[in-house]
Image (cartoon, rainbow, N blue to C red):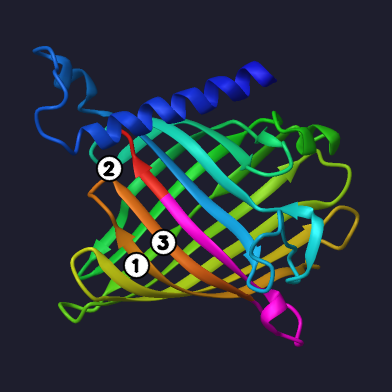
Amino acid sequence: MKKILMTILAATTLLSQGALCSENAGTTTMKAGDAGLLDNVTAGYFGIYHGNSLTDPSSPYGLDRNGKVTQKANINLDGTLSAGYNITPRFNVGPEIPFILIPVLGKGAILGDVGFKVSDNNTIYYQGFKLSNSFGIQLPTGQSSLDRKMSMAIKIDPTLRYEFGQSGFTLGNYGELKTYLGVIRDKSFKIWTLPYANYKLTKTVSLNLGYEMEWQHYVNTPNTQFSTYQMDLQPGVNWSITKNVFFGPYLQIFTTQSDMNMDKMAVGAVISAKLL
């Protein structure tokens, strides 16, 4: 397992360096024909940083789903390294390697459930409205999934976006529907959604307001019975540092329980990089 994690980290580092170097013209030398080989190949990283409580920014511990500090919730970067091949301009297929980096208490990296995804980048596009979809299958390579006897996970990730002409305003939604097959305890199905409103200030900077919601169905409960897992408000700023690198810091305000206060607010960030 350690060798696998070290390989993932090394690949992430090397690919990130390659993406940043590509921004500087003349710093990379390519042989004739190399560009053609990579025309239909994609690679990227997407991660979400879960940070500290506002009242204790030096703590190694983060907040749980109710906005409470707990030693089970370390600050971490929960991300996915992905690669793919464009079989058409619309469809992309390839593997995904999810892993969590925990930079505190000597915990290092935790491998998630490795899988394969088919993405439809343009399911519907009409007058500013765009719907994209992806379908993924994951195997139980993560320890928590192995402990729950998961045989396979299947997920669908719809993404909606509507741009209001040239006004700078955009409304959208990120979503995930995921079923965990064969599990013997805890959640067997998840519904996750994050509707958002965005206003562009410049070509590279915008204001963003999202509201994250998640519901879960648990093993040995009625099929129609879902429990609220987490809800939080996310005001923040989106910054496209380059055409390939994105950084979106935000304030996470937990609303699952009514007694909101500074202790139940944390810092977070979305980080993504297009590597190929």
Number of residues whose C-alpha sits closer than 10 Å to that of mark 2, classed few (under 14), some (14–19) or many (20 or more): few
Q: Nearer the viewer, residue 113 or 109?
A: 109
Q: Is residue 87 visible?
A: no
Between the residue at mark 2 and the residue at mark 1, the CA separation in whole angstroms equals 17 Å
In the rendered structure, does residue 267 fall within the stretch colored magenta? yes
Between the residue at mark 2 and the residue at mark 3, the CA separation in whole angstroms equals 26 Å
* Callout 2 amino acid: Arg
Circles 2 and 3 in contact, beta carbons < 8 Å: no
Q: Secondary structure at mark 3?
A: strand
Q: Secondary structure at mark 1?
A: strand
In the rendered structure, does residue 5 fall within the stretch colored magenta? no
Residue 211: x percent and y percent? 54, 75
Q: Which mark is residue 248?
A: 3
Q: Nearer the viewer, residue 44 or 61?
A: 61
Span colored in magenta: 254-271
Residue 273 placement, left or right of 167: right
What residue is shown with label 2? 90
Q: Residue at x 49, y 69 (%)?
A: 250
Figure quadrant of the C terminus: top left
* Nearer-N-terminus badge (3/1): 1
Foreground mark, 2 or 3, reads 3
* Callout 3 amino acid: Gly
Residue 249 placement, left or right of 258: left
Number of residues whose C-alpha sits closer than 10 Å to that of mark 1, classed few (under 14), some (14–19) or many (20 or more): some
Give the quarter of the image for residue 58. Answer: bottom right
Q: Residue at x 14, y 18 (%)?
A: 29
Q: Residue at x 50, y 48 (%)?
A: 47
Q: Which mark is residue 161?
A: 1
Q: Which mark is residue 39?
A: none
Figure quadrant of the N terminus: top right
* Nearer-N-terminus badge (2/3): 2
